[in-house]
Image: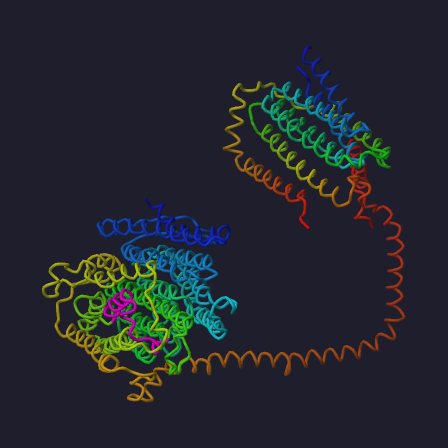
Amino acid sequence: MVLQAVFLITALLTLGSALMVVLHRNLFISALFLIASFFGVAVFYVLLEAEFLAVAQVLIYIGAIATLIVFAIMLSRGMMTGRTSPRNAQALWAAGGSLALGAALLYVVVFRVQWPVAEKAVPADMIQRLGTGLVTDYVVPFELASLLLMAALIGAVMIAREKEV
Amino acid sequence: MIPLSWYLAVAAILFVIGFYGVLSRRNAIAILMGIELMLNAVNLNLVAFWRYTQPDQVAGQVFAIIVITVAAAEAAVGLALFIALYRLRGTVHIDEIDLLRG
Amino acid sequence: MNGVLFLIPALPFLAFVFIVLFTHQNRRVSAGLTIGATAIAWLLGWYIAFQAFLNPDEVMEAPFRLTLPWFAGGYTVFYTGFQVDLLTAVMLFMVPFLCFLIFVYSLGYMEKDPRFSRFFAYLALFATGMLGFILADNLLLAFVFWELMGVCSYLLIGFWAFRRPEETHIDTAQVQRARAASLKAFLTTRVGDTIMLVGILLLYALTGSLRWDEALSPTSLKALAEQSTYIPFLGEVPWATVLAVLIFWGAIGKSAQFPLHVWLPDAMEGPTPVSALIHAATMVSAGVYLILRTFPLFYVVEEGANGAMGFVAFIGAFTALFAATMGVAQFDIKRVLAYSTISQLGYMFAALGIGAYVAAAFHLLMHAFFKALLFLGAGSVIHAMEHGHEHAHEHGHGHRTEESLPFNPNDMRLMGGLFRRMPRTAWTFVAGGLSLAGFPLITAGFWSKDEILAEAWYTGHSVVFWTLAIAAFVTAFYTGRQIFLVFFGEPRSAAAQHATESPTTMTLPLVILAFFAVAAGWVGIPEAFPGLGAVVRGWFQRFLGVQAEALGLHVEALPFEPAPVLISVAMALGGLGASWLVYGRRPIGVTDPLQGALGGLWMAWHRKYWVDELYQATVVAFARWLSQVAYRFDDAWVIDPLVDGVGRFGRWLGARVRRFIDEQIIDRAVNGTAWLSNLVGEWFRQIQTGQVQNYLLAVLAAVTVLLVLGLF
C-alpha cells in the first residue's frame, strides 16, 4: 500500500515536471523541471529494484546531460530575449495528435493486453552479475558503446570548435 | 505489489509528453529535452519489463545502460550541432531553418 | 614459444604503421622505431636459430609452428601460419641480423635526405616482407610476403624518383632513370610472379594444400611424379615438373636470372643500403630460398625423365657466366656488384640444378654476408665521393681540369687511390672482394664456391663444372679490377682527392660484416678436407643435411678430390692476378685497357649483350604494336566505322521517323505528362515546408492512425 502511494506521488511529480518542461516559456526553468523529471524516473528505478540504473540515471542524466543542456541554454541565451512565442504554429495540432496517441497507448497498455508476469525476486548479487555480464556476454555491445561515446565526443568537439579563419 | 501496467502507463504518458515537446517547441534545445524525456520513457519500459518478466537475467538492464550511453552521445553531438548552428545562422529556432523546403 | 614467431614479422610492421601514422615528422623517432623493432626481431630470430643449431634433431622432429585458420574455401578451411625448421633457422640467422646492420648503416648514409622517415618506414615494411616470407609455412602466405617485398623493392628503387630537383644535387636525368628503373623492376618481376601464381593455383588444385609439409608430402609427391600431362612439343610431362618449372619462373624473376635479369642492374638507381639489403642479400636470394623450399618438386622426378633439374641447372650455370662477363665491362661501381649478384645467384641455382641442396644454401648464406658488405662498402665510397666533390668545389680545388668525364659519384673511372683516404672502408671492401673472388682457405666465398664446384665434379656434371669454373675466373677478374680501380693507383678526379672516411654508423657495420664475410665460411669446411676438415667436420653440411634427409634427399660427405679444389684455387688466383696485370701494374686513363684488347667482345659486355635493346625491340615493341593495332582496330578500322555507320543510319532513320511520329504523337504525350507532373508538383510542394517538425507531426498522425486501426 505504501509502495503504491509512493508510486502514485512519484508518477504525479514526474509527469507534472515533464509537462512543465514542454510547456514553460522560460527555457531555463524548463531545464530545471527536466532535472526533476529525471529524478522521478530514478525513483521508479529504485521501486523496480534496479539500484544500479537509478544511480546511473542520477549520475548521467542529471549530472551530465542536464548540465550540458543548461550550458547550451546559457551559451545561446542572447537570442531568447525577444518576445517570440516558444511554440510554433503547429502546436495545437501537435497537442491534439499527442493526446490521441496517448489515449490509444493507454488503452492498449491498461485494458487491451494481459501482460505476462513472472513472480520472481531480483537476485541479491544483481549488480555483480551485471558487471560480469558487461565484460563477458555483452562485452561487444559494451565496447561498441564506449567507441560510440568517444566518436561522439570527438565529433562534438570538431563540430562545435571555433573555426580559425 | 505495483501492477506492471502502471509503469507502462506512466511511460506511455511520459513518451507522449516528450513527443509533444519535440513537435511544438521552436527552440532546438527544448526539442532535445523532449527527446530526452522520450528516451527516459523507453528506458522505464525496458526496466519495468525486465523486473516483471526476467529479473534473474541481466539483458534488460544492459539494454537500458546502452540506451543511456546513446542518449549521452546524442546529447553531446546534438548540443554541439546547435552551437555550430547558432554561430552560423544566429538562431536555434527550428522553424527558421528550412533548407529542405521544396 | 611458438607464439613468438608471429612477433618477428609483426614488429617491423608495427614500426611501419607507427611511422606512417604518427611519427613521420620526427626523423629520430622514426629511425629508432625501425631499428628497435628490427633489433628485437633479430634477437628473437637468433634465439630461435641457436636453439635449432644446438638441437637440430629435436627441431626437425617438432618444428616451431604457429597455425591459424585463414579462410574457408569451398569444403576446406585454409590454414596459414609460421614455422621454423632448420632451413628457416639458417635464414633466420642471416636476415634480421643483416637488416639490423644495414638499417644502422642507413642512419649515416641517408642522414641528409629530406624523406628520411619515409625511407625507414619502407625499410621496416621490407623487413616484414622478408621475415614473413622465410617464416611462412605455406606457399600462399609466402607469396603474399613475396609480393610485399616486390612492392617495397619498387618503392625503394624509385625512392629518388619523386624528389624535387632543388632538394639535392641529383639531376633530372637521374630522377627519370630512377622512375624508369622502379617500373622496370616491378614489371619484369611481375612476368615471373604471374607464371608462378599459375603454378601455385595448380599445386592447390592438384594436392588440395599449400603447406610445405602437406603439399610436398611423400604421398602427394609420388602422385605428382607419376601423373603426367601432355604438353605440345614436349610430350608427356609429369605434373611435378610442370609445377616446378612454373614456380621456378617466379624465382627467375625475383632472383634476376636470365632472361628476366635486366631489372637488377637498373635497380641500382635506388639508395645503396637498399641495394645491399634488397638487391644483394635478402630479396633476390628469396628466389633461391623458394626453390630450396619446394625442392622435392624438382627432385622427385628422375633425372633424364623430363625433370625440372636440368632446366634449373642450365639457367643457373648460363646466368653465372653470362652475368659475370657483363660485370667485367661496367664502370658504375654498383652495377659491377649487381652483375656479380646475378652471377652468384646463378651459382646457387646451378648448385640446386645438380642436386647440391646444402651447397646452394651455404652459398646463399655466405653470399648474403659478403655481398652486403661489398654494397655497403661501395655506398661508403659513393658517399665519400659526393662529399669530396662538394669539398673540392667549395674550396676551388678544381685544378685537375683534364677531367673529361662528367662527375658521377658511382663512376670508377673517377676514383682511384682511395685506400689511403678511407682505410676502414678499403680494408673491409678488400675482405669482401676476396671472399667474392674465392680467395683460398681464409675467405667464406672460397668454401661455399668450392662446395658447389666439388659437388658438380663429384656428380659428373662436367658442363656445369667448367661453366662455373670459368665464371669463377671472370668473377675474380672483375673483383680485382674493381678493387684496383677504386682503391689503388692515383686519384683520377678532384672528388677522389678530397674524399674522406665515412661516419662510424657506416663503418661499424662494415667491420662487423667483414668478420662474417671471412669467418662465417669456416663452419662449412668439409670433413674430408685435409687438415682443417678434421676441426670443423663439415658442421653446416651435417646440420642442413638433417633437413635434406627429411626431404628425401640423400646427402653424403663428399670424399676429398684435389682436382676441383686446385682448379677453383687456380681460377681465383688467376683471375686476381690477371686483373693486377691489366689494372694494377700501371696507371690507367679514362678508357679501359681491356677495351682495346678485346674490341667487339668488350663492347658486347659493356652494352650487356644488347639484351635491353633486344627486349626494347621485341617485347616492348610488340606490346606497343599490339596496343597500336588494338587502337586502330577500335578507332580506325573496324569498331569505330561500324559504330559510325550504325549512327549514320540511325540519324537518317530518325529524321524520317521524327516528322511523322515524334512531333505529332510523342511530343504531345511528353508535353502533356510534363504539364501534369508540374501541376501535381506545384500542389505537393506546399507540404514540403522544410520544417522537420511538420514532418514529425505527419509521423505522429500516421502512427496514431495505424495503432487505432490495429485495435479494430
Q: Depth check: C510 or A147 in front? A: C510
Percent of width and height locating residue C468: 24, 75
Horizontal side of C296 relative to A153 (left or right) equals: left
Percent of width and height locating residue C473: 23, 77
Residue C144, visible in the rendered structure: yes
Residue that appears at 33% across and 69% down = C378
Percent of width and height locating residue C165: 51, 69
Quick check: A54 above or below B21?
Answer: above
Residue that appears at 22% across and 66% down = C448
Percent of width and height locating residue C116: 45, 59
Q: Depth check: C300 or C101 in front? A: C101
Question: In which image quadrant can residue A71 be found?
Answer: top right
Quarter of the image for the C terminus of chain C: give it.
top right
Does the magenta portion include C429?
yes
Protein image colouring:
rainbow
Quarter of the image for the N terminus of chain C: give it.
top left
Residue C242, visible in the rendered structure: no
Question: In which image quadrant can residue C104 be found?
Answer: bottom left
The residue stretch that appears in magenta: C411-436
Horizontal side of C698 relative to C370 (left or right) equals: right
Report the label total.
Answer: 0
Majority secondary structure of magenta residues: helix
Question: In which image quadrant can residue C708 be found?
Answer: top right
Horizontal side of A139 relative to C452 (left or right) equals: right
Does the magenta portion include C174?
no
